[in-house]
Image (tube, helix red, strand yellow):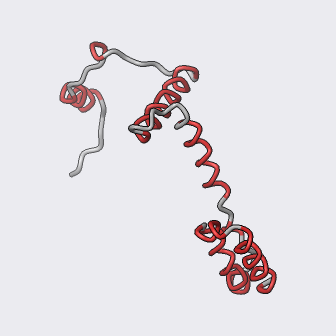
């Protein structure tokens, strides 16, 4: 396995040297030792995390490139609002919500029989 990894890295370097800055190629170097010490390398998969790159890239397509982080955040917020509404969620107006926590907590302590520390 060690020899095959070395051959792969050699041919990959000849084909495209830019790939050597990727963590996957460095992880390959440690794979034989990991297998010897811990058994099958189940935690070496990085595809799950790399799939998020596609999601973020898709959100940045319509960005004006002046503030890409803000544009991506707005896109995710919009998606989250739509998901919330389609799953039956509600949005309350500020006038409908009592923002005074003292009134809520007072009522909670008066109505509930809470255990008291003796």
- Camera-side residue: 110 or 14? 14
- Camera-side residue: 33 or 89? 33
Horizontally, residue 63 falls left or right of residue 17, namely left
Indicate the quadrant containing the N terminus: top left, top right, bottom left or bottom right: bottom right
**Residue 93: image location, x then y, percent:** 33, 15
**Residue 63: image location, x then y, percent:** 48, 33
- Camera-side residue: 22 or 28? 22
Q: Residue at x 59, y 48 (%)?
A: 52
Q: Residue at x 30, y 34 (%)?
A: 113
**Residue 76: image location, x then y, percent:** 49, 34
Please determine whether, in this image, residue 100 is positioned above or below residue 2: above
Please determine whether, in this image, residue 20 is positioned above or below residue 57: below
**Residue 43: image location, x then y, percent:** 66, 68
Horizontally, residue 109 falls left or right of residue 50, namely left
Please determine whether, in this image, residue 66 is positioned above or below residue 117: above
Q: Residue at x 66, y 81 (%)?
A: 30
Q: How many marks?
A: 0
- Camera-side residue: 42 or 60? 60
Please determine whether, in this image, residue 105 is positioned above or below residue 98: below
Horizontally, residue 113 falls left or right of residue 101, namely right
């Amino acid at each position: 396995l060690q020899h095959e990894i070395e051959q792969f890295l050699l041919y990959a370097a000849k084909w495209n040297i830019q790939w050597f800055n990727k963590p996957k190629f460095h992880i390959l170097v440690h794979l034989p030792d990991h297998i010897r010490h811990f058994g099958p390398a189940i935690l070496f998969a990085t595809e799950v995390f790399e799939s998020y790159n596609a999601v973020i890239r898709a959100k940045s397509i319509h960005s004006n490139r002046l503030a890409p982080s803000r544009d991506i955040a707005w896109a995710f917020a919009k998606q989250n609002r739509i998901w919330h509404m389609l799953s039956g969620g509600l949005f309350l107006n500020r006038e409908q919500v009592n923002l005074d926590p003292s009134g809520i907590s007072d009522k909670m302590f008066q109505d509930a029989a809470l255990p008291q520390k003796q």
